[in-house]
Image: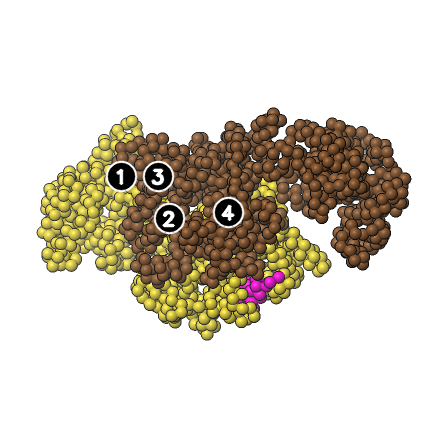
Chain colours: A brown, B yellow
Amino acid sequence: MSENKYVYDFTEGKREQRELLGGKGANLAEMTNIGIPVPFGFTITTETCDLFYKNGKSYPAGYDDQLKEKIKIVEEKMGTKLGDPSNPLLLSVRSGAAVSMPGMMDTVLNLGLNEVVVEGMIQKTGNERFVRDSYRRFIQMFGNVVMNVEHHDFEKILDNKKETKGVELDTDLDANDLKDLAKEYKEMVKKATGKDFPDEPMAQLQMSIDAVFGSWNNPRAILYRKLNDIKGLLGTAVNVQAMVFGNMGDTSGTGVCFTRDPATGENVFYGEYLMNAQGEDVVAGIRTPEKLETLNDVNPEAYKQLCEIREKLEKHYKDMQDMEFTIQEGKLYMLQTRAGKRTAAAAVRCAVEMVEEGLIDKKTAILRVDPASLDQLLHKQIDQLAKSKHKAVSKGLPASPGAAVGEVVFDAEKAHEWAEEGKKVILVRTETSPEDLIGMNAAQGILTSRGGMTSHAAVVARGMGKCCVAGCSDVVVHEKDGYFEVNGEQVKEGEYITLDGTEGEVFIGQIPTVDPELSGNFGTLMEWADEVRKLKVRTNADTPHDSEVAIKFGAEGIGLCRTEHMFFEGDRIKAMREMILAKDLDGRKKALDKLLPFQKADFKGLFEVMKGKPVTIRLLDPPLHEFLPREEADIAELSKEMGVSVDELKQKIEALHEQNPMLGHRGCRLGITYPEITEMQTRAIIEAGLETGDDTLVPEIMIPLVGNVEEFKNQRAIVVKTADDIIKSAGSKMEYKVGTMIEVPRGALTSNQVAEEADFFSFGTNDLTQMTLGFSRDDVGSFVPEYIEKGILEKDPFQVLDQTGVGQLVQMAAEKGRGVKSDLKLGICGEHGGEPSSVEFCHRTGLNYVSCSPYRVPIARLAAAHAALKE
Amino acid sequence: MSENKYVYDFTEGKREQRELLGGKGANLAEMTNIGIPVPFGFTITTETCDLFYKNGKSYPAGYDDQLKEKIKIVEEKMGTKLGDPSNPLLLSVRSGAAVSMPGMMDTVLNLGLNEVVVEGMIQKTGNERFVRDSYRRFIQMFGNVVMNVEHHDFEKILDNKKETKGVELDTDLDANDLKDLAKEYKEMVKKATGKDFPDEPMAQLQMSIDAVFGSWNNPRAILYRKLNDIKGLLGTAVNVQAMVFGNMGDTSGTGVCFTRDPATGENVFYGEYLMNAQGEDVVAGIRTPEKLETLNDVNPEAYKQLCEIREKLEKHYKDMQDMEFTIQEGKLYMLQTRAGKRTAAAAVRCAVEMVEEGLIDKKTAILRVDPASLDQLLHKQIDQLAKSKHKAVSKGLPASPGAAVGEVVFDAEKAHEWAEEGKKVILVRTETSPEDLIGMNAAQGILTSRGGMTSHAAVVARGMGKCCVAGCSDVVVHEKDGYFEVNGEQVKEGEYITLDGTEGEVFIGQIPTVDPELSGNFGTLMEWADEVRKLKVRTNADTPHDSEVAIKFGAEGIGLCRTEHMFFEGDRIKAMREMILAKDLDGRKKALDKLLPFQKADFKGLFEVMKGKPVTIRLLDPPLHEFLPREEADIAELSKEMGVSVDELKQKIEALHEQNPMLGHRGCRLGITYPEITEMQTRAIIEAGLETGDDTLVPEIMIPLVGNVEEFKNQRAIVVKTADDIIKSAGSKMEYKVGTMIEVPRGALTSNQVAEEADFFSFGTNDLTQMTLGFSRDDVGSFVPEYIEKGILEKDPFQVLDQTGVGQLVQMAAEKGRGVKSDLKLGICGEHGGEPSSVEFCHRTGLNYVSCSPYRVPIARLAAAHAALKE
């Protein structure tokens, strides 16, 4: 037993020992060993924590002796002694696992104080108020985090005291008040816990260590590990360190600093400090901290030393560092260093510049930037400073990132009109439907009171790169009366609101926004990512405009063009409705003939923008009733337009109504019952292709919702016959491909059969998720948030691919499909195509490409590079 | 090559050679060889057909010689000669595969006739009209089936002739007319085909053989084989046989007979015949055929011979035979024998009595009865004779078998009231919802205009063993105006209609019905089935009454009790609505406390009926909005009842509305967001169990819609805590099981995880089919019928388990589950549990039991026996 080492002092550890010493402990040791001034201390290992649990919450043999030995070393180094009133050693105790983890025990400071030591320290420092304040803070912290007394109970006593004294701030209390407080605190602790507050420093220390280990398995920490998929850790380490004080007078102070600007990434020394203050004062915001540069005036020696440490640590760690320091009576101590949190812009700039400086290589640079964070760079954002002065009136789902300011409008048509007049508008609706596309397109942003992260509004808005707050259930839209209510406020049509789609917040009034800057560094990083990734990245785009945006963002083709999105404007919707309401095949064909030129022009536009890059066009997918009006007034109008009675119209709409439209008459089921639709769409694609005159063009025609190879065969036959006739008549040799969406579980299960017939598969993971999990994405709002809260689901499966369930089907389908046709082209075109962990899954599964909305293309490119590098 | 034998004469074949000679050919040979008088002939083998296709539609070497040789043998046996005007041999040519298969070529009779032979035959028979009629019939048949001239084109000429002559019946045409007709026919054939009608008998014969082989691969035949899953056949055989004539005068005749009564199975000789007639005349119904017994008076010799043949054939084939015979000028010939088609009642009686007679063994008897056919025996049926005098006004889906006669009523409440007054009613609705249960229960039968085979109406009606015609889209219900329209007819409330649920037919007025008779033979057969089957058979039942019915039908437990069905009556629905509308947990708990005693009483009733047999109770499954009213008037009433404003009520209903309720907030998702529901239901089950005082009772609690093991763990924890507390307080040692439905694809895919926690799985193949195929069972009416027609689907997947897709998931889940827990109890409780091919699949997959509606229990028992015997 005795050969096991449970306690490492700071000279014994190193940064590579994160697993054993925790992140904090490893860095404190590393700093100590490269000559940075660190208050001395030691770390109790994560292994000890593991054994603590394995032994039924008791410590291994030998631990006690090692602890005592290390305390002796600290005492020697610091020249002080634990519990010695004349020259006391005070300690801080902090938890620290290998991975940063909120939810575990907070810090205990000033450990080692008791009535006797307090008296001695007053003698020694001559600063009674400081010592008494330290003591009452210690009782409060220890009482709360170690002895589990409610924080609130301490605050009550403190508030009482301030009221009695008629003062407002803690700092207005004098030494006597603080002495009283300490007494009252201890009495309250006794009453609440039935135990005396411990006076003996070693007992205080051991209780604190127990508490840290105990907190490893508290529910919050367990949930946090689960939600963040943190596995395989032994436990937490405990860091015990000599106290230094920034609040010992005007030559003392404390601060935080970054080796580069964490907001912009600029290579400047950045930080804040306060003299005569403790760490929490800098954060609390009662006093305004000073800019770091001014420290040069206050204590040039310390500032110079800090600048040297900045350089030393960044070179040493090869990453931007976030450091904490304390100056005690003029002398600088470093309390912590760690990789600094940074904005996406800063991450990109640091990564690229560090490569230029020769500090890191390109691969490291790529991995330094979180793909998901790029979203921040690609959209207009609310100015953060301005935002901090406003309070959100409500919060919904952050359905599509970015910011939008505009006048409220409730009707899609009106949104369009106002926008034409040059107004900036925000479309506010209970939920949106395809009829609203014209208004969504015209609006700066969209706010809905119903629907989840993959509701119509959310999906379309993301596709458009347009800000959207969805499912904001506080909002009640009174469309007819021209206002909406939100938490007691009324907002009328024409009044301004501001949306923060990144956070899901809604503000009344206008808040300034900041435009995105796709700086040179961004471009450089993306180039590096492209060099290493193996997955191709395509885009989901329905219009030439979207395609242009996507190409700018680096898309290598269109993975999904949803033809139905082309059917909603002006004359098109009329022809579409005519088709749906037709009484027979002839009527349908006549209407389809009207749609043909529109579709052809659309496809030609796409082909021209994409210049020979692959374009996958999905045939009509949604159920027909989506194209018919729902509101009485609209039905009446349509009745007039079409010369069909309102009653007949209503009957037709009623007849098309479905209990579960998601599982109804849609996708290839439409093409099978109405082969003339498939014919028309094929004609439009092929004729458009021929008209481009581009020899290299190979259109990819995609049959949606195939669950059965017979469905595919039926549709393929129609496509091939139509296409071959046209190509032959034109005397052309144009090639084309016919493939399918794999989005019905049965399609995945029988993909070997489907692969015999199909040229490619594209996994439609939105619908595949809906059917595999039995979740209607429009309806999950009622339980998925609670599922996530209760830990039943880790993530929203419509945002992050469910690799265990849906992923199993994707993998199975890929294997079965490739088993039949080894060069089968595989892609994914669900919302997941732009989500980093899902992209990584696609890489591992051997797909050829992912396809996502234009604004997510850079995310997918970077995520694909990460996946390749992590392999 | 020359060693291959392509043509077998009737002395060379035997019954075991079905594969080679086809069913018809094998039986003709068999009869010939056991001394039955059969017009001589030969069979061209199915192998020849196979080679015909393999050789690019040409015949193998040697075939020609063999054909000629066999014709010579026939000529010798018959003493006639093909094409010899003085003594001509005439032939019939018929197709005949190993399996009876409509869609292939029809018969050609009288082959060998031409102008010259006709003249000779007139001379020989002295019956010009007979000969000329035979000739024009031959031209018509040959022209149509061999030369592909439209039947219609012949009919037009015939009609013309009759009009010119001013007669109505074919028989009114004289020999001269028929002579003209033959001429006109031949001219028309020439015009239509560009070819002369062949005069040379050998050419006629070879063309006919070509046509039979060609018809093997016509689209109808291919579709038929596909739909009936007929695989592995080589092709069709061709039977060529000397003609005999039943229409040569009063001593000639033709008939069909069965060795037992095909309607009842009684061991009596049963048949019909007509003198001076050809086969088609017996079927055509122009003349009424005579009862077979009377033949004894007409030709006692032939009758006696026929009786001997009856006995000989039945003993020989050991099955009831369906025979065709012809008497030519006093002499009896047998043209065909095959296993006779019979009603379910006859099948059961024949099977059991043949065992008693020592003709067959029990296993054979079991396999003789088609499990699906038992449905006929278990329900009231329309009297067939009476029915033949009525014409159905419309046809819907045969959603639940049986017959019902009653007064039309449109409202569930009124149906209940009228039934209380002693009226027989039929509930007619656009579609039904759980609110209609009270009316469905009171009605004789249910008619809906919308919904498929597994719509609410269909499922509930089958469960109740009640006749239902669903999705009858001709029916338009005008509930408020008190009538429905159907194909131009108006039927008012209170008027009588008759439903045939077995056929899906609707009749206006009353038609007499026949009650089911579960005769002794039925019981005997079921006992034999129980001796051999390995699968257990449980029932889906929600009430003590249903359970009693099921026990009578042989159920061995309850596989699915749907607790929500208990929530719809009187005070229960009130309490349920109170629960749903409650604003907080307290309100919900109060309402649940009111539901508790009802549920407890329900469960106790079930337990008492089942007397220790296993009872699986599924916790609340449907979305809550199903319990709220939809109609304005009902909402107003509820508003008054509950003291909640109409507006608030509507808002709540609106808030609960879902786009795709099937994939929404239901199943265990409810129990997770409202754990108090799970608690109440568990309490009701356990307390009811304890109150029965039955030590052997082990309630099985089933968590619905689990797709994720975490859902199951969450619910199991609530169940276990609640149950254990109650059991402990009661000082009992009662055991219980907690299992889950596997009905979400993800549940099947991750069943290894679920199996770690669950005591049993029950496959909910209804929902599993919905989600795996992406078919909403309420909405598939718009495309599934067309899918089946086009051969995209073989069967309605809600009736017959889709073994390729859904079955793959079931198998995977069973394997993964058993991999973790080898004794995991597996069952199925979807609609498929009572469908024979699905039951067979369950047997092969190693499930422990199937569970189906009470009226399907006998079907499942017999199907399980078949599965075990076929193994």
Residue reaching furthest front? A297
Which structural element holds mark 1?
helix
- Residue A604: give its label: 3
Residue that badge 4 annotates: A467
Q: Chain of mark 1?
A: B
For label 2, count other residues whose C-alpha is less than 10 Å away and answer few (under 14), some (14-19) or many (20+).
many
Residue B283 shown left or right of residue A681 in the figure: left
Residue B178 shown left or right of residue A74 in the figure: left
**Residue B540, image x and y in percent?**
52, 56
Residues under labels 2 and 1: Cα distance? Answer: 47 Å
Q: Which residues are magenta?
A: B557-584
Nearer to us of marks 2 and 4 is 4
Residues under labels 2 and 4: Cα distance? Answer: 23 Å
Residues under labels 1 and 4: Cα distance? Answer: 65 Å
Instruction: Say if residue A130 shows up in the picture.
Output: yes
Q: Chain of mark 4?
A: A
